[in-house]
Amino acid sequence: MNASSPVNRSFENVDPATGAAHSLVHEADDHLVDRAVTAARKATGAWARTPVRDRTAVLRRAADLIEERFEEFVAAETADTGKPVAQARDLDVARAVANFRTFADVVAAAGQESFLTDLPGGHQALNYAVRKPLGVVAVIVPWNLPLPLLTWKVAPALACGNAVVVKPSDQTPGSATLLAEVLAEAGLPAGAYNIVHGFGGDSAGAHLTAHPGVDGVTFTGSSATGAHVMRTVAPRVRPVSFELGGKNAALVFADADLDEALDGLTRSVFANTGQVCLCTERVYVQRSVFADVVDGLVERARSRRLGPPRDEATTTGPLISKTHRDKVLGYLALAEQAGAKVLTGGGVPRLGPELDGGSWIEPTLWTGLTHADRPVREEIFGPVAALIPFDTEEEAAALANDTDYGLAASVWTSDLRRGHRVAQAMNVGMAWVNTWFLRDLRSPFGGVGLSGIGREGGASSLHFYTEPTNVCVHL
Ligand SMILES: NC(=O)C1=CN([C@@H]2O[C@H](COP(=O)(O)OP(=O)(O)OC[C@H]3O[C@@H](n4cnc5c(N)ncnc54)[C@H](O)[C@@H]3O)[C@@H](O)[C@H]2O)C=CC1
Ligand SMILES: O=C(O)/C=C/C=C(\O)C(=O)O
């Protein structure tokens, strides 16, 4: 709920836990975006020529400085998103540190592709590919995990020698701004990291993606906006990397360790108030344990503790905004119209005068929905899930794959052969067995279908943020 002002082109940043504005943010117009891209362009050459050991030293120093200012980052992330401080510490800020260290390691260890080619007459040719940075990379990120998603892109882009212009969500500008201070102190040259604050369409986001000086765009956000960005970039044929929405399934087999599965499901449905692209919104359960899983998950949902984000005991924060809550409430209404049984939740909680102005919602679970119903087909992005029974492994896999999205899935079983088999059958970018959101940052991350284009992580990031020039030498 940010109100823009045409006079001073600034907008209010609202604390979603209370609904109160806590800061005023400058909105970049097309001139400021142009200055940012120009500054980035100027920085590219020298930064690209900086030896890898010096570039990676800047990243490592940035990681150390984030650790030194850890609680400032936690406070910024909590104020902007309303997420509990415990989560901001353990997931968000810790992950930012890990992103910088991992990509420093990955780039320092990267080799080059080479092939020795046999030619007629006993001759040979040596092919080797030299990887060069793209140049100026536009980084557009959403509000749900602001710092982890920003640094997931900025760290490899900088490590590869690019300059970046970042456009955080208008709802979560704080940590990207703090990161600018950290990167400057870490020794990053001026112009290599630039921020433009503002909105998407007809604002900083649109100006940035349309700018002719941008050499590549990396975007995380909704599938609809991803498609829009792709259309904007298409006439200039620039590389894009898109990590978009999901409608992720969990498959619980009767042979699973049910306590472990229930703990995992609780995290995967309710973490970050369901606002992670990887969150589970469809839970398929083998019929013989359906009642047990329903009861166990309802009990765990009811024990989620909604409360002030700065209270260490809070486990569930608000949604990001009233607008987003209206969207989620719309799906709650659709589910009831479709005949869903609301097992728990289903509305807006009352948390007292301090918090009732915030965008809170109750963790909600349904049974009785089918694949014909929109709450089972469309990304809701809230603390909600539909539980649906199945009989056979084939049926479970078919149900899980019956979606236009293809981001993540989790399989819960004690039969590891089945775990491998079903995980491999999932039409997704990431499939977990007996866990969820367990990340090795060197592994490929991304989705298929409406869930995105391309992969980032480890070598995949190096491939996106660089272009190879293959040199062929006749020996
Ligand atoms: N990774 C995911 O799965 C995410 C999904 N969502 C879903 O998307 C819905 C809408 O949320 P939004 O914050 O509006 O997501 P969004 O995808 O529209 O916004 C993400 C980022 O893109 C920017 N943006 C928006 N329009 C743009 C344009 N035309 N050109 C360039 N940049 C643009 C935004 O300012 C923001 O920084 C949510 O209700 C949620 O369901 C939201 C965030 C992340
Ligand atoms: O990179 C990760 O581990 C998680 C990424 C999550 C998103 O991209 C998202 O929630 O949008």
Image (cartoon, rainbow, N blue to C red):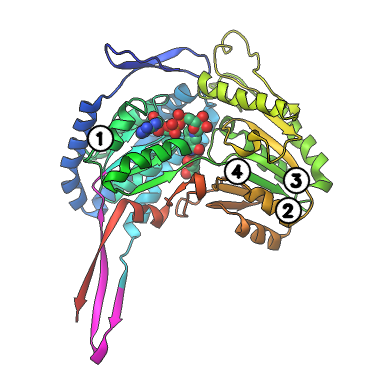
The disc at residue 248 is 4
Residue 88 in sight in this render: no
Camera-nearest label, 1 or 4 = 4
- Membership of 211 in magenta stretch: no
Measured Cα–Cα span from mark 1 to mark 3: 50 Å
The range drawn in magenta is 115-136
Left or right placement of residue 4 versus residue 287 in this view: left
Residue underneath mark 1: 184
Q: Residues within 10 Å of mark 4 (few under 14, many from 20)?
A: many
Residue underneath mark 3: 285
Measured Cα–Cα span from mark 2 to mark 1: 54 Å
Measured Cα–Cα span from mark 2 to mark 3: 11 Å
Amino acid type shown at disc 4: Asn
- Classify 118 as above or below 136: below
Q: Residues within 10 Å of mark 1 (few under 14, many from 20)?
A: some
The percent position of residue 408, horizontal first and vertical second, equals: 57, 47
Magenta span: predominant SS is: strand
- Classify 441 as above or below 18: below
Measured Cα–Cα span from mark 3 to mark 4: 14 Å
First reached walking from the N terminus: tag 3 or tag 4: 4
Please tell me which residue lies in front, 430 or 459.
430
- Classify 255 as above or below 335: below
First reached walking from the N terminus: tag 1 or tag 3: 1
The percent position of residue 330, horizontal first and vertical second, equals: 61, 24
Amino acid type shown at disc 2: Glu
Left or right placement of residue 375 versus residue 252 in this view: left
The percent position of residue 205, horizontal first and vertical second, equals: 33, 31
